[in-house]
Image (cartoon, helix red, strand yellow):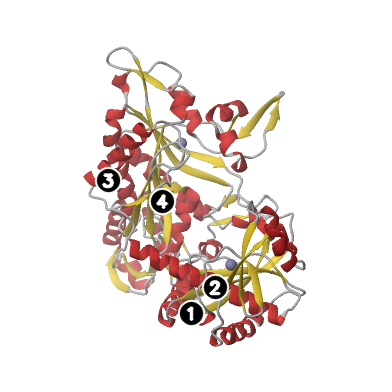
Amino acid sequence: MVRGRERQAQDKGLETMRHSAAHIMAEAVQSIFPDTKFGIGPATSGGFYYDFDLPRSLTPDDLPVITDRMNEIIAQDIPFVREEVTKEEARQVFTAQPYKLELIDEIPDDKVSLYRQGMFIDLCRGPHVTSTGEVKAFKLLRIAGAYWRGDEHRPMLQRIYGVAFDTKKALEEYLKKLNEAARRDHRKLGRELDLFSIHDEAGAGLVCWHPKGAVIRRVIEDFWKDEHIKRGYDIIYSPHIAKLGLWKTSGHWEFYRHYLYSPMDVEGEEYIIKPMNCLYHILIYKTRLRSYRELPLRWAELGTVYRYERSGVLHGLSRVRGFTQDDAHIFCRFDQLEEEVVGVLDLALFMIDTFGFDSYKVLLSTRPEKYAGTIKIWQEATETLARALDRKAIAYEIDPGEGVFYGPKIDIKFEDAVGRAWQGPTIQVDFNLPQRFNVTYIGEDGKEQPVAMVHRTVLGSMERFVASLIEHYGGAFPVWLAPVQVVVIPVADRHLEYARKLEAELKHEGIRVEVDDQSGTVNHKIRQAQLSKVPFMLIVGDKEVSAETVSVRARSGEQQNNVTFTSFKENISKAIVDKVKDLKL
Ligand SMILES: [Zn+2]
Ligand SMILES: [Zn+2]
């Protein structure tokens, strides 16, 4: 299945319009601040931004003023005009624009293109819409600081973000979604629900899991391990640092150095902190000769890795510097590859479904321009991945040339409750590492054969996956994942003993329960539990104590009185075991 041409053209059209909106915004800003120095102003997935160096800090009050000015420019329907000039001519145009001069210096050709609309001229490859009137529906959203070229040693510019759509209706729908996304923002909920924190004193992108966040993670990890063991995986562990030489052999030092932290000296030898777990798995594989009989080997590790990401791109749990991959490597014969990929797909979809995501999109990425291995082996492996997808009746799109250099891959992006896509499972065949490390097995004929190696994750990383869960559920986790599953609320102190008894019995069943023994009214305690998004509250007073019952209140507000405690306990236990997404009273 090839990505629809029509949709591609539509996306391209939107992108062009959004980029044009960025130029219009730049003109508006220039008309207000004539000395503006301009950074860059590209289209983004929903809109556009432009970076400015301005004489003063912008405030939200500036946005309506800039918006009005943009609307005037749009109403005048001014044409966008393209010009081609030499680099020297371009330098003359931008003498007062240091950032543009820097960009001009880096253009390899001598010809550069400029775009002009009205009084505003920009260094730009284009394309643009024909005139400003074609920008129909836009909104400026916010102002943020952005280092020039994302480099924290360069000046901090002011970035204005905007969104733009073909119609007012599409814009309004998008803004509604955006509001909903802000309400579900995992950074905000992570703080409110006391799940995790990131500390300037410790370093950006390094996550501390608080007890409640750690519960969610532990439940996921336990489930993950059990499910892997059921499906024929072995769990392994590997160290966090390794000699640099290993990463030179693998090619990481050559190709991914920008993601690696600097080496540290250990008794005169250089070590680095690991950016991936693969090499240790290979070392374990190579501790002895492997026979065709013992393949496939499926080795899984919740392996914590560290990658250098620029501070500007870090984002809560979803983009971090240290993260735990739910990693596994499969070593198999090439004739086993299809079956193995089918197995991983099955596991991946099972996971997505269990965690309550209903829709997903699958991409099969093919051979890029630079690649390891032969065309023949790429073709065969790509066909194998496609066959596995067909066998599972999974619809997919081909992402031509987007495979990593070492092999074709399948990416699964799942969608959350508000329609945003999250990078989830990936399955990658690798022709590079087995060759560089001479990873082989002894075939039936007694001869050494190259092994087929698959890298795969089914959740991605614990950090990003938990971020997706927080946003998908807006913090109201299904009962099996909720950090606290039940709060017992005694109406008065004389009901505390009964509350403690219920607590002990629920704990005995492995249910995460707390008694709210603080002073305060029942209503206040209910509100507190509701804010913490605890799935169930058990309210116990005189009637409940004498009848051995509970009043059950769900966080949805539903309430049921006179429920026998035993039946509540059985229901919730079953819902936890069955991983029920939405337990009704
Ligand atoms: Zn441009
Ligand atoms: Zn790997």
The reply to whether dot 2 and dot 1 touch (C-beta < 8 Å) is yes
**Where does label 4 land, which residue?**
424
Say the numbered circle drawn on residue 389.
Answer: 3
Rendered location of residue 398, percent (x, y) = 34, 50
Q: Are marks 3 and 2 in contact (CB under 8 Å)?
A: no
The reply to whether discs 4 and 3 touch (Cβ–Cβ < 8 Å) is: no
**C-alpha distance separating marks 3 and 1:** 42 Å
Residue 204 in the image: x percent, y percent? Answer: 64, 52
Q: Evaluate whether residue 229 shows in this view.
A: no
Q: From the viewer's perspective, is 25 left or right of 462?
A: right
Asked if the residue at label 1 sits under 8 Å from ligand 1, the reply is: no
User: Please, is residue 531 above or below residue 73 in the view?
Assistant: above
Q: Give the CA distance from mark 2 to mark 1.
A: 9 Å
On the image, the x and y values in percent for residue 87 come to 69, 59
Single out the residue that lies furthest toward the top.
446
User: Residue flagged by tag 1: what amino acid is it?
Assistant: Glu
- Categorize mark 2 by other alpha carbons within 10 Å: few (<14), some (14-19), many (20+): many
Q: Nearer the viewer, residue 122 or 482?
A: 122
Q: Which residue is mark 1?
A: 134
Amino acid carrying mark 2 in the image = Ser
Residue 443 in the image: above or below residue 504: above
Instruction: Give the label, 4 or 3, closer to the camera.
Output: 3
Q: Is residue 350 left or right of residue 203?
A: left
**What is the quadrant of the C terminus in the image?**
bottom left
Secondary structure state at the residue bearing disc 1: helix
Which element carries disc 3, helix, strand or loop? helix
User: Is residue 284 in view from this perspective?
Assistant: yes
| For marks 1 and 4 on the same chain, the one whose residue lies earlier in the sequence | 1
| Other-residue count near label 3 (Cα within 10 Å), few / some / many at <14 / 14–19 / ≥20 | many
Camera-side residue: 204 or 556? 204
- Residue annotated with mark 2: 20
